[in-house]
Amino acid sequence: GIQVEQSPPDLILQEGANSTLRCNFSDSVNNLQWFHQNPWGQLINLFYIPSGTKQNGRLSATTVATERYSLLYISSSQTTDSGVYFCAVDYSGSARQLTFGSGTQLTVLP
Amino acid sequence: KAGVTQTPRYLIKTRGQQVTLSCSPISGHRSVSWYQQTPGQGLQFLFEYFSETQRNKGNFPGRFSGRQFSNSRSEMNVSTLELGDSALYLCASNYGTGIYNEQFFGPGTRLTVL
C-alpha cells in the first residue's frame, strides 16, 4: 500500500513564529487532506488539496502531485495552533479510504 | 448543517464483551468510513459503507463488523473485546462523487477495554 511520511514528528515554537510541515507520499493520489486533531481527539478539516495551493487565514497549503509531496504553512503561530497535524491521502479514487501519516505534534509556547 | 455525530462519546468495557458504536453522517451524505486510532498503530481504516453496502474493508479481524441503515446512519460492532481494542474510533462522513471525495470526521468514541 501507499506510504505517507510526515516531518518533523515534533515541533516546538514560540508564539508568533512561522512553521512548515511536510508530507511525502509514495504513489500518485487522487485526494489529499490536512487535519488538525484537537485535544479531545476530533479531526478538524484544514484543507482538501490534491494539487495546487490554498490559503485560509494564517494557514496555507501546497501540494505538488507530480513530486508527491504536500506542505502546510502556519504563520504567526498561536498557542491554540498546538496539537497534532495529520496529512491523509486517498490513492484509490473510489474506496473512500484515507491513509494517514503519523502526524506532526506541534507545541506553541506563549 | 449539523456535523457528524457519534455516540456514545466514552465507553468502558471488559474483555470478552461486545460493543456497538453509532455514527450519523452529515445530512445528505450517503457514505460513511470508520477508523481506529491507537498510539501504536496511528489512524487505520476499518471499513466504508455506501447505500447500506460495505464497499471496502481494512485489515482488521472479523470481530470488527459494521452496517448502515437506510437513513445513512452507521453502526460498528466489536465482539469478544480484547485489551488491544482500546482506542479512539472515528467516523467520517464522505462528500463527493467519483474520485473527488472529502471526509469530515465526528468527535469520536473513546473505548477503554479493561
Image: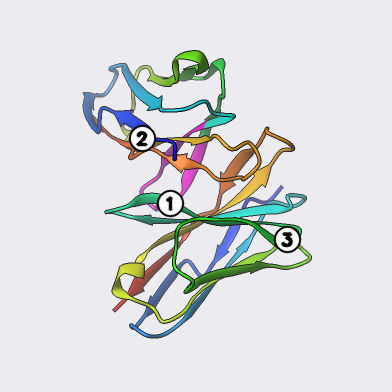
Could you tell me the amino acid type at mark 3?
Ser
* Residue A50 coordinates in the image, percent (x, y): 56, 24
Q: Which amino acid type is shown beneath numbered disc 2?
A: Thr
Could you tell whether B72 is left or right of A27 in the image? Answer: right
Pointer 3 and pointer 1: residues touching (CB < 8 Å)? no
Q: Report if residue A62 lies within the magenta region.
A: no
Q: Mark 2 and mark 1: span between their CA atoms? A: 26 Å
Q: Which residue is mark 3?
A: B72
- Provide residue B102's location: percent of width, then percent of height: 62, 37
Residue drawn at x 33%, y 40% as measured from the top left = A102
- Foreground residue among A99 and A27: A27
Query: The magenta stretch spans which residues?
Result: A33-45
- Tell me which corner region of the image, top left, top right, bottom left or bottom right, holds residue A82: top left
Residue most extreme to the front = A1
Task: Please indicate, yes or no, whether residue A89 appears anywhere in the rendered image.
Answer: yes
Q: Which residue is mark 1?
A: B44
